[in-house]
Amino acid sequence: MFFFVLMIFIGGAFLAQLFFGYFQVRHFSHVFVQMRRKGKVAIGRKKGNLRSGTIVFLAVDPHGEILDAKKMQGVTVIARFRSMKHLIGENIQSISAEKLENDNNLVRLAINDAVHNYKIVAEGGKIEENHGSPLFNASIMVKSIFQKSKKAGN
């Protein structure tokens, strides 16, 4: 009986996460489209392993002036984008440290990531993607070790 109740609880939690995750992705897409209508969008992110992760959108005009800035920070699927009015009007390539002093460390790192990504793309470069979490990357490494040992055994 306990196992059955536990499975129902886990299934319900999974369905709730899917439900709220769907609305978070819709909100993310809606905000991105709004920002994109204003200009190019520099995106910065900083994963918080056990802390809240942070995503930053910076809408930028052709001269590098920030037209709008938003951040989403949280550990749950109910996190939403919030405005960062203190960055509006700044040049993306020369954001002053004073403008960032009231932001927490994860937000500062996400803003720096957005600036870094903007500079790479502006210079015609390509942003390297990190595919997967550390656990996913470790599982790939273990699989490749098993495949090598199988080939060595044949």
Image (cartoon, rainbow, N blue to C red):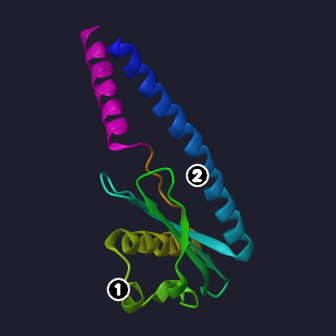
The kind of secondary structure element at disc 2 is: helix
Q: Nearer the viewer, residue 58 or 13?
A: 13
Question: Picture coordinates of residue 96 (x, y %)?
Answer: 41, 91
Quarter holding the N terminus is: top left
Q: Which residues are magenta?
A: 132-154
Residue under the image location 66 percent in, 57 percent down: 29
Is 150 one of the magenta-colored residues?
A: yes
Q: Residues within 10 Å of mark 1 (few under 14, many from 20)?
A: few
Question: Picture coordinates of residue 6 (x, y %)?
Answer: 37, 21
The kind of secondary structure element at disc 1 is: loop
Q: Please give the residue where the numbered disc 2 appears in the rendered image.
A: 24
Circle on res. 101: 1
Residue under the image location 37 percent in, 92 percent down: 98
Amino acid type of the residue tagged 1 in the rendering: Glu
Amino acid type of the residue tagged 2 in the rendering: Gln
Q: Is residue 4 above or below residue 102?
A: above
Left or right of residue 8, residue 148 in this image = left
Is 70 one of the magenta-colored residues?
A: no
Residue under the image location 50 percent in, 58 percent down: 79
Residue under the image location 39 percent in, 84 percent down: 100
Separation of marks 1 and 2 at Cα, in angstroms: 28 Å
Q: Is residue 65 above or below residue 28?
A: below
Q: Nearer the viewer, residue 116 or 11?
A: 11
